[in-house]
Amino acid sequence: MRTIDGSPMTGGTLSLGTAAAPLAQNGLTIKAGASLVLNASGNGDTVFGGNAGDTIMASGDGAHIEVGSGANVVTADGASDIIVVGLLTSGTISKATVIHAGGAGNTIAFATQATALAVGSTIEGTSIVFAGGASEVDGGSPSVGIGANDTIQFGNITGGSETVVLTGTVTGATSAGKVALTTLSNVGANDILVFNNTSTETTSGLTFAVSEVNITAAANLAAAYNLAASAMSTLPGQTAVLDWFRWGSDSYIVEAVNASPSAASHAGLGTGDVVVHVSGLSDLSTLSGIAFNTATHSLVF
């Protein structure tokens, strides 16, 4: 393991690696006290940015990246990464962070509930508030969704917003097989999910809040997925339909997708459908502002 410690710096920029020649060693530990510009391709790197705003490109698997209160851009293309915003500061964060994470099995957290994810740092930010800026988590651009089986922990937002792009983040299997989920926690007002999987996306009921599916007959989650995905037994061409159901103390959002140009039956969860697990929130209808915007293909909490 090699440690690069720039933490005594209080100004300027610490630049390490380039796009053409990234740092390739595995297991690097990098600490920056000022603005960090990093290009790294090794596996298992640990990166502590500064509070001035960092630009981090880490293409290996298993990276652990922590950034502070600046306007950060993090591109992490590997799998099983942990990316945390705000652990290096406390109080109010008013600048937006953009996270491009296209790999599978990532955990991405805005610091409010991220204490357990910290590695070797002192955390003050248990009550951090993101008060401005429009942060976004996507798979490399605003039109590409994040990786399969990713977990997103939202922060406490007042006046700002956090958007997660789910375009193309599909189950990859029927409910009889292993279903790829996107898991969300600490969901609240101003959090946004962008689906954008077909030209037309709508809800199974008149509004998203009333689009709850009765899954009383479901003996297990697989059966519940099927019931939710078949709320409309036939889907028009290039159309997707969203609904949701409660399961224990959590809820699940299901998008049934027909990407073909012709109408097709939809009898259960399919490989091109989307499942979002909302942890710790069983009744989505209690979110007074929740609505699906058909023009932007976005579910706004």
Image: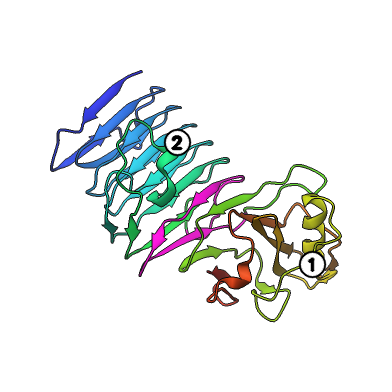
What is the C-alpha distance between the residues marked 1 and 2?
Answer: 43 Å
Q: Which residues are magenta?
A: 142-168
Quarter of the image with the N terminus is top left
Estimate the x, y position of residue 9 in percent, counting from the top left: 14, 36
33 sits to left or right of 136: left
The secondary structure type at the circle numbered 1 is loop
Q: Main secondary structure of the magenta part?
A: loop
268 sits to left or right of 288: right
Q: Is residue 109 above or below residue 158?
A: above
Estimate the x, y position of residue 206 in percent, counting from the top left: 69, 81
- Name the amino acid type tagged 2: Ser
Rendered residue at 40%/60% (across/down): 156
Count of marks placed on residues: 2
Rendered residue at 44%/38% (across/down): 116
Rendered residue at 83%/58% (across/down): 268
Quadrant in the rendering for residue 232: bottom right
The secondary structure type at the circle numbered 2 is loop
**Tags 1 and 2 in contact by the CB under 8 Å rule?**
no
Tell me the mark number nearer the camera, choosing from 1 and 2: 1
25 sits to left or right of 176: left
Asked if one can make out residue 206 in the rendered structure from this viewpoint, the answer is yes
Specify few, some or many for label 2: CA neighbours under 10 Å numbering under 14, 14-19, or 20 or more: many
Residue with the most extreme front position:
249
Q: Residue tagged by mark 1? A: 214
Q: Closest to the observer: 54 or 192?
A: 192
Residue with the most extreme top position:
1
Asked if one can make out residue 20 in the rendered structure from this viewpoint, the answer is no
Q: Residue tagged by mark 2? A: 59
Q: Closest to the observer: 264 or 225?
A: 225
